Amino acid sequence: MDNVSIIVDDLEAVIAFFMELGMELEGKALIEGAWAASVVGLDDQRVDVAMMRTPDGHGRIELAKYHMPEAISGVPEDAPANTLGIRRIMFAVDDIDDVIARLRAHGAALVGEVVRYQDTYRLCYLRGPEGIVIALAEELT
């Protein structure tokens, strides 16, 4: 897998949210014109794109802010976990409580609770800016 794309409205807020998770901003670019639109099946487009890279360099998230055509909402921001489509991205963390506290400063809120899965993991779902849902997994040693 090369990357996962997330369409956003507030590009800077979402960049800051993922940077708090340890992701690095790889670069930003304006993508526009018929050539790019034809790839995604639009008549024309103007999109700001930010590429975020995981600290290990093995994964990336592409954040896209559409100026033309304007983005449309496909599901409610507070869609539950059983909504069709991609619902979350999971991140392995060393200290789940610390990460939750840091992400709350960026508007994140727990979807449910922090739970323990056997003697293996502590897990939770968080809803961040623009309804983006992430999961955190802290391996227990």
Image (spheres, grey):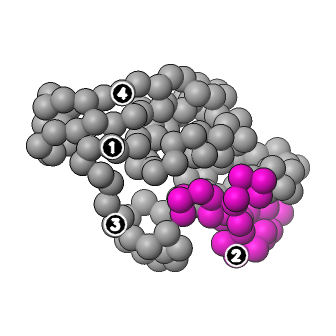
66 over 2 or under it: above or below: below
- Pick whichever, 25 or 94, lies toward us: 25
> Which residue has dot 1 on it?
67
- Which of the pair 78/118 is nearer the observer? 78
- Say which amino acid is labelled 3: Gly
| Secondary structure of the residue carrying numbered label 3 | loop
Report if the CB atoms under discs 2 and 3 are less than 8 Å apart. Answer: no
Q: Which residues are magenta?
A: 104-132
Q: Is residue 134 left or right of residue 4?
A: right
Assess whether mark 1 and mark 2 are in contact (beta carbons under 8 angstroms): no
Q: Is 12 contained in the magenta span?
A: no
The three-letter amino acid code for the residue at tag 1 is His
User: Horizontal placement of 51 versus 141: left or right?
Assistant: left
From mark 2 to mark 4, how far is it between C-alphas?
37 Å
Q: Quadrant of residue 71?
A: bottom left
The image position of residue 81, as x and y in percent, is: 52, 73
Q: Which residue is mark 3?
A: 74
- Compared to 58, does 125 lie above or below? below
**Which of label 4 and label 3 is nearer to you?**
4
Q: Which amino acid lies under the numbered mark 4 shown in the image of this protein?
A: Leu
Left or right: 50 in relation to 53: left
Of mark 2 and mark 3, the one earlier in the sequence is: 3
In-image side of 113 versus 52 (left or right): right
Foreground mark, 3 or 1, reads 1
Residue 82 in the image: state x and y as whole percent: 47, 76
Residue 127: say if magenta. yes
Which disc is residue 112 wearing? 2
